[in-house]
Image: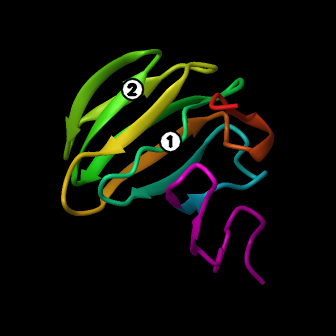
Amino acid sequence: MAPEWLITDPAVLEFYTSERCHITELMNTPLSPETSLAVARVEPGVTTQLHALSGIAERYVVRKGKGLIEVNGQTSPVVVGDQVVIGAGVSQRITNMGATDLEFYCLCTPRFTPESYVNLEG
């Protein structure tokens, strides 16, 4: 039997969201309420839904592709290695500006919960 602090076979699978991106949750468990980690994948030409995370700060680290990030109404291009710090409750979305998938790590503090997601597109 595994110790309570070890999470084995978390069934890490990619799923598509209404946010218009694919998500693979690498770590999101009540055993670690202070943080969660996922990989987001945005297809070429797609812009994710304008949204905010209530009570949750988020950081992106771009690992593949190139995009245009919008945070609190300001935009900036992003490429592999770029990091984006998004405060809790701040509006955000990203557009894939390349010919291949845009992928980035999403680190949330505290951990992401579906109840925190606020759709700002209506």
Figure quadrant of the N terminus:
bottom right
* In the image, residue 10 lies in the stretch drawn in magenta: yes
Residue 3 bears which disc, if any? Answer: none
Label 1 Cα neighbours within 10 Å, binned few <14 / some 14-19 / many ≥20: many
* In the image, residue 70 lies in the stretch drawn in magenta: no
Which residue lies at the image location 67% right of the left edge and 41% below the top edge? Answer: 111
Q: Secondary structure at mark 1?
A: strand
- Residue 76 against residue 119 in the figure, above or below: above
Taking the image as shown, residue 71 lies to the left or right of residue 52, namely left
Which residue lies at the image location 59% right of the left edge and 58% below the top edge? Answer: 27
Where does the magenta region start and end?
A: 1-22
Taking the image as shown, residue 102 lies to the left or right of residue 122, namely left
- Residue 57 against residue 49 in the figure, above or below: above
Q: Amino acid at mark 1?
A: Leu
Q: Position of residue 31 (x, y in %)?
A: 76, 52
Identify the residue under disc 1.
107
Camera-nearest residue between 114 and 57: 114
Which residue lies at the image location 74% right of the left edge and 44% below the top edge? Answer: 113
- Residue 58 against residue 21 in the figure, above or below: above
Identify the residue under disc 2.
70
Figure quadrant of the C terminus:
top right
